[in-house]
Amino acid sequence: MSLIKSISGIRGTIGGKVNDNLTPLDVVKFASAFGTWLQNNKNKKNLTLVIGRDARISGGMVSSLVTATLQGLGINVIDLGLSTTPTVEIMVPELKADGGIILTASHNPKQWNALKLLNEKGEFISGENGAEMLAIAESEDFNFAEVDDLGNYETRNDAFDIHIQQILDLPMVDVEAIKAKKFKVVLDAVNSTGGIAIPMLLDKLGCETIKLYCEPNGHFPHNPEPLKEHLGDICELVKKEKADFGVVVDPDVDRLALIDEKGEMFGEEYTLVAVADYLLKHKNGVAISNLSSSRALRNIARNHNSEYFASAVGEVNVVTLMKEKNAVIGGEGNGGIIYPDLHYGRDSLVGVALFLTYLAKENKTVSELRAGYPSYFMGKKKIELTPEINVDDILAKMEKEYQNEEVSTIDGVKIDFENNWVHLRKSNTEPIIRVYTEAKSQEEADQLADQIIAKINSLI
């Protein structure tokens, strides 16, 4: 199967052979490396780390291994138990911890798990820091604590309450306006921790929640990536319940997709567009997304006399550019909302609260909101990789092939045509080339993707 080491963390499939998969020995090695890296970079004793996990089946085992390893290094552990990625990010600075580890493989299927690594700000460590940590793992230069110096262990069960209260306290979240509307919302949490956190938030906002796949048992009832082809059940339930809209989150609750009242996809891309539209109406500034995100965000920013910039793909790259430009809002086109007034991390909970505020104030249906935005359609396809394929060589050939178009090589190869674009990049989390396209119709976007895939296959 697979073990992937990147700035997104250490990600792999459970079981199998050491160094090829995320086995118990690999979990211990990389937890040891991260703990050792922190100790090497902190001028203090008694380090503390916050950990939390999504509901996937291997989570309890992986959490036990990580906890024991950190304690063995002499590091104190605060365990949030079942949590979300944004909740752990919030709690690291809240608890004045030295870092954090989130045990989740995000949208990957149930056989995967991962260690996502956070610094003391509750933000993902940089690529440079990640490289230092991986070097420690490679050398296995660990020094474990003696018996009197083992780390302490404690649990916290108030993390969701703290996270939600911080959202409710945001000036741009109008709790009373939302409560007055008494929205009816269907939630698909793919049987992970969004099934705990999102209903708690919706309850505080006076919404009625219809739960679909909200039992946090890790048995994902469909592919956990929140794409249209996986979401037939919630689309039908929204219509059946005559709900105002539907909410879909991935297993670690950092990606947010919406379904309109007609049971149609609002579009992952347009989650960020709608939230940016709301915020930039009230405060001109900068909006940031990555190179694989829709042109619609650029259009919305310009409509509000605001600026738009694109970063390389990857949350850490978006955050870096957001800080550089002092952005009002940012995120990724996969439904990842980053609202810096709360924290620098993708957060479905704050995305829900900001979207509900906008919906309440606009006095429109979700489909009416969507109809007001530029109509772009995304194609998201992929090419499975085998070991003999030289991806860098293929991308270089594609860059040369389309040299007469507007080409960016900040991250892979993005080719901007007059009416559409394609972005090709090697995934950090799976052995694939991602092929993103955007055009004025779904058919055109898919055709462009197929043409590009055919071209790449001919080069292979």
Image (tube, rainbow, N blue to C red):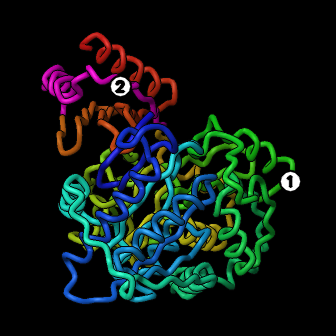
User: Among all residues in the image, which is located at the extreme front?
Assistant: 147
Q: Which residue is mark 1?
A: 241
Q: Residue 80 lies in magenta, yes or no?
A: no
Q: Quadrant of residue 417?
A: top left
- Magenta span covers which residues? 377-406
The correct choice, above or below, for 235 with respect to 39 in the image is: above
Q: Residue at x 47, y 25 (%)?
A: 446
Q: Nearer the viewer, residue 410 or 417?
A: 410
Q: CA distance from mark 1 to mark 2?
A: 42 Å
Say if the magenta span includes residue 381: yes
Q: Is residue 18 above or below residue 140?
A: above
Going 70% across and 78% down the picture, which residue do you hit? 205
Helix, strand or loop status at disc 2: loop
Which residue is denoted by mark 2 in the rendering? 385
Location of the C terminus (image quadrant): top left
| Residue toward you, 93 or 294 | 93
Badge 1: few (under 14), some or many (20 or more) residues near its Cα, within 10 Å? some
- The mark lying in front, picked from 1 and 2, is 2
The reply, left or right, for residue 311 in relation to residue 367 is left
The answer to whether residue 141 is above or below residue 220 is below
Q: Residue furthest top?
A: 458
Q: Residue at x 48, y 49 (%)?
A: 269
Query: In the image, residue 392 lies at what x, y percent?
Result: 18, 30
Residue at 46% from the left image edge and 58% from the top image edge: 336
Q: Amino acid at mark 1?
A: Glu
Residue 37 relative to residue 403: left or right: right
Residue kind at label 2, given as amino acid type: Leu
Query: Counting other residues with Cα less than 10 Å from the Cα at mark 2, is it few (<14), some (14-19), or many (20 or more)?
Result: some
Up/down of 78 relative to 351, above or below: below
